Image (tube, helix red, strand yellow):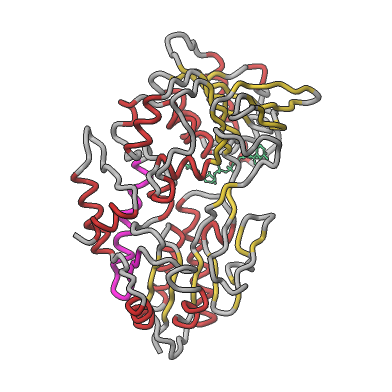
Amino acid sequence: MVLSIAIVGAGPSAVYCAEALKTKSPDARIDVLDRLPTPYGLVRAGVAPDHQGTKAITRVFDRIVQKPGVRFLGNVTVGGDVTLDEIRGTYDAVVLATGATLDRRLGIPGEDLAGVIGSGAFVFWYNGHPDHVEAPADLAHVRSAVVIGNGNVAIDVARVLAKTPAEMSKSDIAPHAAAAIRGALISEIHIVGRRGPVEANFTFAELSELGRLGRCAPVVDAADLPADAGALPEAVRKAKEANLATLRAFAAADHAGKPLKLRFHFHAAPVAIIGRDRVEAVRFQRAAQTFELPADLVVTCIGYRCATLGGDAGAIRLDDARGTVSNVDGRVAGGLYAVGWAKRGPSGVIATNRPDSHAVADRIIGEVGAGSAKPGPDGLDRLLSARGIRAVSFGDWLKIDAVERAAAKDGAPRAKLVTFAELLAAAAR
Ligand code: NAP
């Protein structure tokens, strides 16, 4: 019997899972399905558009999804075009690589005011995700933006708002987002953590890049910085000391001449978002005191949680505390697995997914490696054709890619197509 596997989602965890399955079971037939017409999940829609070096991993992914017996099928919604039950009946195993697509909520008053946006929606918008073409907020009148959270996503959001058009010119930011940010009048960005500078999750490369921005100065109060990182395991301590040194350099720098200030605030927990028709300020609590920061835009960068798939017939339960699909070491139910953020929650960089997905692939081979008489890819093709659904193949994606690259201007790698209609038209050329 030939093993057949459907991976739902085409981001890094999906591709690494396909890589390992193909290595361990060379005859396996693997379909990587995505709701979008484009592959690679957060590499396209999450990684910041000015971090093109990170996106270069797609060259590795291209080789994996073109291996014999592996197919990319975009524009196929599991839980819409086909149900999860149907997919499970068609393949020996199904792997959920669906990520954590929903923003976590702060749970404080005022969170639903206009101008308050989760980082997921904001990042998808500036990266040209077809579900997020509409601007999530009117940026035209934003003078003061508050970014809540002390992780790398908070830094990405602050940096994309702060960079000049020239600094973004070699990025693949969605053209409509670039225009909206260019038209904003932002003079202050506040980045606020509920814990201290040692506890912040920033990585050194991301934090230190903020000191090299053209029009934006990172502003830190030296009094907020402890003398050292304290007692921590050696590797962690070194990373934290490096961050502290960077923050000290920001505190000592001369900020004159840079019109946009990026102000760091620590030990400040958000307690209310204030405004009449739209956000006007955020109230924070620090020790026994409260204070407010003016805000025309608030982006909450506080993590993500998983969504279920439509028509999942109860097989997928969510673990709300971890923000994941309920699973034990990647096993969700018989023949159903999870990888990536659906498995472990919204943490880690692209490379974190490789060993994680490989371990789940080992488990799959151990549990269903003998294969069965299920029809696999041929069965899916029959289902899609009966329903008139035209999947986007890897070759079709290359046509989208070529159109985007041909439209690029001023040194940008591509001009993204951002609506389903444009993407599908390019795929059908
Ligand atoms: P993260 O690193 O977990 O940061 C989330 C932040 O939100 C933390 O500072 C957390 O504070 C804070 N937070 C959570 N709940 C909050 C609340 N109710 N009120 C105030 N603050 C709250 O997550 P992330 O920034 O979303 O990034 C996700 C993953 O992607 C991370 O592993 C990150 O490194 C990775 N990533 C990497 C890059 C890169 O390498 N360039 C870029 C982007 C993302 P506490 O710590 O106090 O909980």
Please count the marks in the image.
Answer: 0
Reply yes or no: does residue 58 show up in magenta: yes
Q: Position of residue 145 (x, y in %)?
A: 53, 26
Residue found at x 35% / y 33%: 178
Query: Which quadrant of the frame does ligand 1 lie within?
Result: top right
Q: Residue furthest front?
A: 277
Q: Residue furthest right?
A: 288
Quarter placement of the C terminus:
bottom left
Residue 266, above or below 232: above
Quarter placement of the N terminus:
bottom left
Toward the viewer: 274 or 330? 274
Residues in magenta, as a range:
52-74
Q: In this image, 62 relative to 352: left or right?
A: left
Toward the viewer: 228 or 163? 163
Residue found at x 54% / y 18%: 219
Is residue 28 in view? no
Residue found at x 52% / y 78%: 85
Q: In this image, 97 relative to 165: left or right?
A: right
Q: Quadrant of residue 293?
A: top right
Q: Position of residue 32 (x, y in %)?
A: 39, 68
Reply yes or no: does residue 279 show up in magenta: no
Q: Quadrant of residue 395?
A: bottom left
Q: Residue furthest top?
A: 256
Residue 155, above or below 250: below
Q: Quadrant of residue 126?
A: top left
Q: Position of residue 185 (x, y in %)?
A: 44, 20
Toward the viewer: 89 or 419? 419
Residue 28, above or below 298: below
Residue found at x 60% / y 21%: 294
Is residue 110 in view? yes
Q: Position of residue 95 (x, y in %)?
A: 49, 70
